[in-house]
Image (cartoon, grey):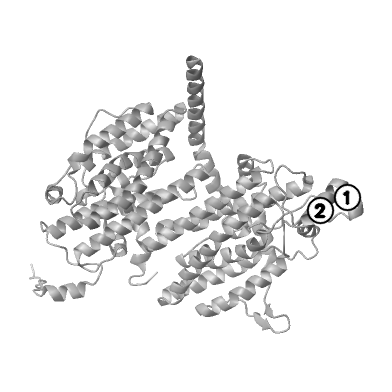
Amino acid sequence: MPSLPDMMTPDAAALAKAAGKGEAIPLAAGTPEHDLFTGLLRLGDNALILGHRVSEWCGHAPVLEEDIALANVALDLIGQTQLWLGLAGTVQGRRRSADDLAFLRDAWDFRNLLLVERPNRDFGHTLMRQFLFDAWHQPVLKALEESTDPRIAEIAAKAGKEVAYHLERSADLVIRLGNGTEESHARMQDALERLWPYTGEAFIGDEIDARLAEAGLMPRPEALRPDWEATVRAVLDEATLHAPQDDFAQTGGRQGRHTEDLGHLLSTMQWLQRAYPGAAW
Amino acid sequence: MYAQMVKTDGKGIKPDAEMTPEERRFQARIDAGEKIEPKEWMPDAYRQTLIRQIGQHAHSEIVGQLPEGNWITRAPTLERKAILLAKVQDEAGHGLYLYCAAETLGVSRDELTEALLSGKMKYSSIFNYPTLTWADIGAVGWLVDGAAIMNQVPLQRTSYGPYSRAMIRICKEESFHQRQGYDIMMKMAQGTPEQKRMAQDALDRFWYPSLMMFGPSDKDSVHSAQSMAWKIKINTNDELRQKFVDQTVPQAEYLGLSIPDPDLSWNEDKGGYDFSQPDWSEFFAVLKGNGPCNRDRIEARQQAWDDGRWFRDGLSAHATKAQARRAASKVAAE
């Protein structure tokens, strides 16, 4: 076997300069900066990916009022993305903007829940996904308002107001469709069963979550479960829907292992930035 | 406005002597600049013409969501994505105001939707053209919304109250739409060679279809004369087209883009540009259904309508059940 040339570059600064914006050297794992950066990506990527999914409906919703309401939700989520990823870029300290993080990372660097990348399917599936997410999103933002980092608390307070409305709306529609016609009930029950395995992931913490919670920056994922369960149980009861008994959870999104769907979503979303590197839009 | 070639039922303007007393009073109110309100008497032809015109405008807003929606998932930055979403959302909102205005004339939104899907009612020819690059989103805002504004600003003074009020709200938002479109064009025109190419290509493809938006010359049209007497049309198509060209040419020059018309030239005598007419045979072909995207647009609307049926039925069923429960508990309480 021929010997391979030495690819090691001892000069980290030269490497950083050569790498350019898109490929900043990663923060060292286990450092407080890396923990906070990851925590912020987890929040920002949820908003980004769900906002993108919801925006796919624009112009195609079943009634005009829903088209308008969905666009509002997508707009709120994109706005939240700008705040969370903007702060993530600041914490990372590599001069990457929210846009750089959104458009120039590959799938394995995304930290969103698998739930939010699941495809839209029918409108009932989209609403159920939204409800299961909103029921988690509201308590997480409420807890983040108490963060020891005032930048986080401020974003959470702003986003919390928007998400209170998202939850009110998605819960109301789940109830009405669950307890509507036979067909709407069946569709909502089917959506619930399909999405259920993707709900558990939000409550399984790792060592990064533990350290963030220890520092008072973000809540422990496990701590959010009772709130979520209470909301979901009450709404499903009123909707005459039944949560599956199986509590198996698909996991990996928060660590960067995603479903096949995310790659397709990114190849659409990032296409212009990738095809014309360095152009300003 | 996005209405083209709206027919009136009349055969031109009735001479004063042939009008009934009601018609004469009605025309006098319009001439005096009064607004006609939903419950007031109006000639049937006025009502039917307005339904066609407002309906066509509403449909244009709804179908118009599609070519721009085509780029929401590919918008190049978070800010552009948010702006485009907000704009397409505004269009849904415009559709909603306009359907509501049409409802005051006695036609339901569902009836209008059925008429759109069956091809009985039209929408603006412009939305049958595809959006092929990101620069098209700029061109649609700059040219298409620009052309729409030309028509909508005078329509704020239209004689039918609900239509006039809808137009006032719509105009506020349209000027934001046009500015965001021009802003995209600026970025592209000042950008990389590929971006400039996209910008010029978008102008090349959208220029003539934008001129068609005003409709063919109507200086001899009996329908237009009647609509103008009723003040549901304020200017002729040619007047508006001229105004649009005069406004747009310097904007293109500022961008460093060229209008795809070798015969375009400033005419000192008329104080406006001379320009080439669009290919009107293409226009009529598009109206007939043979534009690049006619079938795709209607199919997309049809699919949204069909796929949404269970959703609409579910909400209605829930409302009925809730009403029955309320009635039952009222009986129990008594």
Tell me which residue sits at (34%, 53%) in the image: A265
Q: Nearer the viewer, residue A142 or B47?
A: A142
Residue B123 visible to the viewer? no
Identify the image quadrant of residue B260.
bottom right
Q: Residues within 10 Å of mark 1 (few under 14, many from 20)?
A: few
The amino acid sitting under disc 1 is Met
Q: Which residue is mark 1?
A: B19
Q: Position of residue A42 (x, y in %)?
A: 24, 52
Q: Position of residue A129 (x, y in %)?
A: 35, 41
Label 2 vs 1, first from the N-terminus? 1
Above or below: residue B31 compared with residue B191: above
* Apparent side of residue B305 relative to residue B160 in the rendered image (left or right): left
* Apparent side of residue B152 relative to residue B199 in the rendered image (left or right): right
Q: Position of residue A108 (x, y in %)?
A: 23, 55
- Residue B200 image label: none
Q: Looking at this view, name the residue that lies furthest to the bottom.
A: B268
Q: Which residue is mark 2?
A: B27
Tell me which residue sits at (63%, 73%) in the image: B245
Disc 1 on helix, strand or loop?
A: loop
Q: Are marks 2 and 1 in contact (CB under 8 Å)?
A: yes
Counting the numbered discs, the total is: 2
Distance between mark 2 and mark 1 Cα atoms = 9 Å
Q: Looking at this view, name the residue that lies furthest to the front.
A: B334
Residue A275 visible to the viewer? yes
* Apparent side of residue A260 relative to residue A124 in the rendered image (left or right): left
Disc 2 on helix, strand or loop?
A: helix
The amino acid sitting under disc 2 is Gln
Q: Are marks 2 and 1 on the same chain?
A: yes
Tell me which residue sits at (28%, 41%) in the image: A136
Q: Nearer the viewer, residue A155 or A42?
A: A155
The nearer-to-camera label among 2 and 1 is 2
